[in-house]
Image (tube, rainbow, N blue to C red):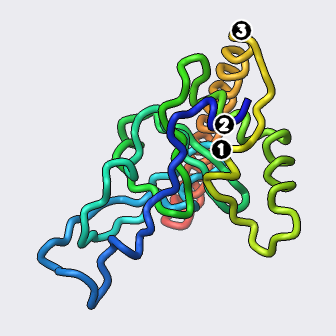
Amino acid sequence: MKIRDIADEIITGVLTRRVVWEEGNGDPSLLKSEKILVPKAINDGLIDHSLLQEVKLYKEVKDKFYTKKGDVIMKLSTPYDSCVIEKEEDEGLIVPSFSLIIRKINPKYNPYFVMAFLSSKCAWAQIKNSREGRVLSIINNVSVAELDVPDFNDEEIKEISNRYKRFLNFKRLSAEIISLEKERNDSLFLKNEED
């Protein structure tokens, strides 16, 4: 089975230079502010909202290029990270051409299974083989669609999905704890300087 058999849509993001306003291009009266899910904001399965890029658009962006609940977004360059759109705050972000959208995933599977596969050595070995002999490490929607996914029964798919979801939650909580501890540490030293 291939990724194209699991998802009905595999779409490369929008070419942002065609829609993002810069001095001298487009009609400034049409400007509209939006957030772009730039590749650096996707980090190890999570979206870092502080790294989203706010831009002004001078053209309408087609609906298919906005994130929707249940989408898997994958970077098209190394490290080929991916993330699942599951929270309301993650919806409605513009996906640029440096990433692709895997959408309308077969109900037998789910976004976490797809993401677990995309982050596995199995997928990475196939990606590496597809890039053999090429100068650029960028992949495209066709190469992702053609990735071979091992067969699993329904129970195994559910277990893989749940395990990967727990893993991502653990990473998110760990990052929050580390951030809070750093803030606490910094405040102790700043307080000491004030005394």
Q: CA distance from mark 1 to mark 3?
A: 24 Å
Label 2 packing within 10 angstroms: few (<14), some (14-19), many (20+)? many
Cβ–Cβ below 8 Å for labels 1 and 2?
yes
Three-letter amino acid code of the residue under disc 1: Ala
Image x and y of residue 156, in percent: 75, 14
Q: Which sits earlier in the primary sequence, circle 2 or circle 3?
A: 2
In primary-sequence order, the first of circles 1 and 3 is: 1
| Residue drawn at the location 57% of the way across and 42% of the way down | 83
Kindly identify which residue carries mark 2: 3
For label 3, the crowd category at 10 Å Cα-Cα, with few meaning under 14, some 14 to 19 and many 20 or more, is few
Instruction: Tell me, for residue 155, which label it has, or none.
Output: 3
Tell which residue pokes out farthest to the bottom in this image: 24
Q: Residue placed at 77% from the left, 37% from the top?
A: 148
The mark found on residue 145 in the picture is 1
Q: Nearer the viewer, mark 2 or mark 3?
A: 2
The crowding category of the residue bearing disc 1, from other C-alpha atoms within 10 Å (few below 14, some 14 to 19, many at least 20), is: some
Give the image quarter of residue 41: bottom right
The part of the image, by quadrant, that contains residue 146 is top right
Pinpoint residue 137: horizontal percent, then vertical percent. Answer: 75, 66
Q: CA distance from mark 2 to mark 3?
A: 19 Å
Determine the residue located farthest toward the left in the rendered image: 29
